[in-house]
Image (spheres, rainbow, N blue to C red):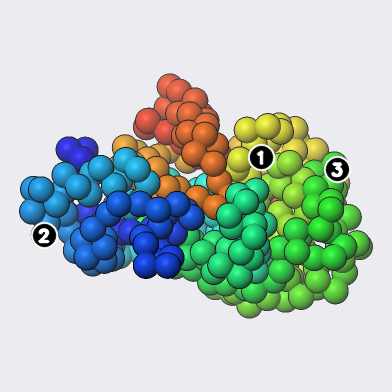
Amino acid sequence: MTEIPDTWCPITLPHVETVDGRLCFLGHAVDADAALLARCDGGHPLAAFTPAERETLGRWRRLGLLLLAPPTAPADPLAPVVVSPHPDDAALALGGTVARRGGRFLDVFSVETWTKDPYYAARPELTRRLLLAEETVAARVLGARVELLGFVDAADRELRREAFFTDPAWSDGFAREEPELFDAVTARLATALAGAGLVCAPLGVGGHVDHLACREAVLALARGGRLGGARLVFYEDQPYALFSSAEETARKLGARLAEAGLGDLHPELWPVDGTAALTKSEALGAYRIQVRRGIVRRIHRHGTRLADGSRGPAAERVWRLRG
């Protein structure tokens, strides 16, 4: 682990559990020292472990049982507040930025059980708990604070269970289709965003209805002058931006906003330095139930491509609302 400073702290992932007296990870038995794993609680730097223990920790890290978190740093007073449709969306899209500046995640639809993993699909209550635990670990790595708004994910809502994507992604139809839910989300966000200096909302790439709900709720607040003097940007949703055009969504949404008198959308690349890129990589390792490792690698490659010819090894892309 030569690339990691010895001030970073190992954290065992929450998916490590004892089942029938055996230590398991992601539902499979593992041969690991439970006492050493217990010390990996985010409070002990690598320097506190013996060379032999550090070698073991390196092996566990490669296997995915744990990840490493940098020392906590004071948050930037202008750190972003990221409206995250679900736990993981903020880190996937803006983890590098938050690693540099700190921030706050507003996890809107934070009650969820959806997964394609058979082990966890058969255990919805465990899945619900672990999805939140994943977010807690990732936020610790990134230096973010998390606020759970407690709304139910589309996959667990009767109206949306079989169809939680909509087309086109720049539509504002969600407010009409689930009006009571939309009003409740908007009201909660109004309170949570009070006093924010920089608000980052999902662009809605891919058309997931929960992402559109968050975007439209933030836009409703902007139209009503309820964001105060906050600067508003829209981030490209990951991993959906790997498969759908963020540029098209921004162009069509921008035209709609300009017609409504809100202004247009202007793209910006936010540079991610080497330490922030490493920190984001560690943080995304926390998401194991819904996010596949191949998707994480593709997100990293996407960030590298965005940064081509720029100031850092990676970048994250947003669109700023210019009123």
Point out the tag, 2 or 3, that comes first from the N-terminus.
Answer: 2
Callout 2, which amino acid? Ala
Give the structural element (helix, strand or loop) at label 2: helix
Query: Which is more toward the observer, 80 or 12?
Result: 12
**Placement of the N terminus among the 4 image quadrants:** top left
Q: Which residue lies furthest to the front in this view?
A: 20
Point out the tag, 3 or 1, that comes first from the N-terminus.
Answer: 3
Give the residue number, with chain letter if any, for mark 1: 240
| Mark 1 Cα shell of 10 Å, populated few (<14), some (14-19), many (≥20) | some
Position in image of residue 223 (x %, y %):
77, 63
Q: Quadrant of residue 62?
A: top left
Callout 3, which amino acid? Asp
Query: Which is more toward the observer, 191 or 68?
Result: 68
Give the residue number, with chain letter if any, for mark 3: 167
| Mark 2 Cα shell of 10 Å, populated few (<14), some (14-19), many (≥20) | few
Position in image of residue 76 (x %, y %):
37, 61
Give the residue number, with chain letter if any, for mark 2: 48
Residue 218 against residue 321 in the figure, above or below: below
Position in image of residue 97 (x %, y %):
44, 48
Callout 1, which amino acid? Tyr
Image position of 176 (left or right of 276): right
